[in-house]
Amino acid sequence: MIQDIEKIAEIKARAKIENSIKIAERLLKNGLVTLMFISDCTNLSIPDIQVLDNLLRSDHYTKKDIATLIDNIYKTKSHDIYKVNPYHLMEYAENTGWISIKRKRLDVAVFQKTVINGDIENRYQINIPLDKDLLDYRSSMQAAILVIVEADNCTEEDLYQNIASTHNQYANNKKDENTRRNADKSKTTDDHNWHPYGYIDSYPVRYRAEKSGEIYMVLSCMDGNISTVYHHPDILYRKIQNGQDGKFYDEDLKVAFYKLKSEYYYHLSKEIEFEVESKHFENTKNL
């Protein structure tokens, strides 16, 4: 399965480069544009465009020469993957609408995102490898980047710049937060904001801490909101340990999530039951 994903990612990357080469070739034959303009249109580097221009001016270049150029560009871009800090990529994902999905593996971070374009809804998932010693690190990182490029509708170059920008902003915010915390360590504020917590049948789930120490979790679907409330048996424990600065205990959230699932499927079963009975009585009436 992993090899299939790697192969698909490589095919997509090479196809994208090949398409850029074709566009660059048409522009070069036009003869009225600059190398900088071609680079902006194709995201190819100027040296690569110059190599292509030299090939086109040659009377004996072959398809193999073009294939070699594509291969060299692909390898160069693949090496750029190692320049991407996976933790900086996680920061970017967290700040651009990607939802973190908890997994037992600690060397891979999983994120999902739903993109709605008109009547079409697409769900994407990325697996960010956190250990550069993993055998499939480069291919897995390349696959994740290609998915983000498609989901966020940007180029790889734009993505690299956005990752750096997000990290700088994150670092500055972290510095400001540490300054604020050090200024008044005795003051602890409750975080009663909404936080995302995965999906149930593609419907988004959110939760927040109540002032009473309870966890309030809600699912938004076509029929409105379905919600549940969970509180630890020791409410004093909940008030002291949870809801502080966005930190919650995973086990408590799991219980709230399972309760919400039960509410959702109970609601769904009642809807189906009502629909079946309505059809039955309608058919009986028509006899």
Image (cartoon, rainbow, N blue to C red):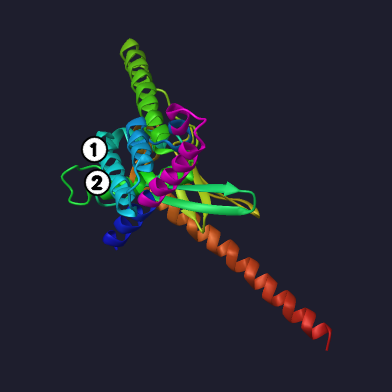
Q: Nearer the viewer, residue 30 or 211?
A: 30
Comes first in the chain, label 1 or label 2: 1
Residue sitting nearer the eye, 158 or 203:
158
Which residue: 30% across, 42% down?
A: 73
- Amino acid at pointer 2: Arg
Question: Measuring 49% from the left and 56% from the top, which residue is drawn there?
Answer: 200
Residue at position x 34%, y 37% from top?
Answer: 54
Q: Secondary structure at mark 2?
A: helix
- Looking at the picture, does residue 156 appear above or below residue 267? above
Measuring from the top left, give residue 249's x and y in whole percent.
34, 42
Q: Position of residue 160 (x, y in %)?
A: 36, 32
Answer whether residue 11 is visible to the viewer in this image. yes
Q: Amino acid at mark 1?
A: Tyr
Q: Specify the segment rendered in magenta.
A: 14-38
Q: Which mark is residue 82?
A: 1
- Distance, label 1 to label 2, CA atoms, is 7 Å
Tell me the number on the disc at residue 138. 2
Q: Residue furthest bottom?
A: 287
Q: Which mark is residue 17?
A: none
Judge left or right: residue 29 versus residue 268: left
Taking the image as shown, residue 130 lies to the left or right of residue 173, namely left
Q: Quadrant of residue 145?
A: top left
Q: Residue lying at the far front in this picture: please name it.
A: 59
The question of residue 270 being in magenta is answered with no
